[in-house]
Amino acid sequence: MGNRGQIQSYIIIVAMAAIITMLLVYFGFQAWKSMGSKTAEIQSLKFEADFTNAIAEIERRSGSVEREFELPDGYSRICFLDPSRSQLHFPDPPNPLFVQFAEEQKNVFLEGDSMPLGYRTNQIKTDVDDRWPCFEATDGLVRFRMSGGGMSGGVVRLEQISYAS
């Protein structure tokens, strides 16, 4: 009789250990999964802060500086809305989120495999004859020559600098 009680308590201990192990695996996976989305959010916020600060910094300067920006994971292009162009032409076919971003006064957009992101910065002009100029990233990086408006402030001009192959 004593052995039978030991076997039953052993089965209960093994079952409880299995349940605890499954719970640890489940909650560990959930934490790991949420960590990936937090990383993407942090990268997005860092890009927005870096880019917006660079625009604000160069806006009142004379001359130009070269700046490199790392796009968040999942993005391969950066696009701008240049309000100085006469008509609002959307890329063909138009991305509905770009239209929404334009209505929200956002003028910087990130495109790629992830959901497009939009940001609002001070006014930007590019040397590209397009109201929606887009620039491809190289290994997740884009490099621009940024020129300010001097003491009068105003518009920042961007010119993409290609990476040497």
Image (cartoon, rainbow, N blue to C red):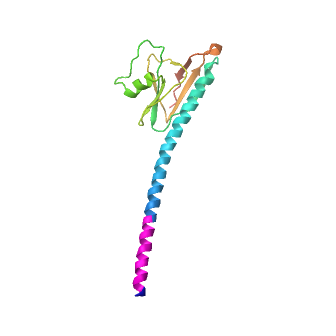
Q: Would you identify the image quadrant in which residue 11 lies?
A: bottom left
Main SS, magenta region, reads: helix
Q: Position of residue 13 (x, y in %)?
A: 45, 73
Is 98 situated above or below 149? below
Q: Position of residue 61 (x, y in %)?
A: 64, 19
Task: Tell me: 119 left or right of 62.
Answer: left
Residue 64 inside the magenta-drawn segment: no
Q: Nearer the viewer, residue 88 or 27?
A: 27
Residue at left 40%, top 78%? Answer: 8
Residue 7 inside the magenta-drawn segment: yes
Residue at left 50%, top 39%? Answer: 41
Is 147 situated above or below 44? above
Q: Position of residue 145 (x, y in %)?
A: 57, 23
Residue farthest left in this picture: 93
Q: Would you identify the image quadrant in which residue 143 lies?
A: top right
Residue farthest bottom in this picture: 1
Q: Which of 60 and 64 is in front in this view?
A: 60
Is 80 situated above or below 12? above
Quarter that holds the N terminus: bottom left
First to last magenta residue range: 3-19
Is 78 situated above or below 130? below
Residue farthest top in this picture: 86
Q: Would you identify the image quadrant in which residue 50 lies?
A: top right
Residue at left 45%, top 38%? Answer: 74
Q: Where is residue 109 in the image (x, y as percent from the top left)?
A: 46, 28
Q: Nearer the viewer, residue 80 or 162?
A: 80
Count all numbered tags in the image, as a single digit: 0
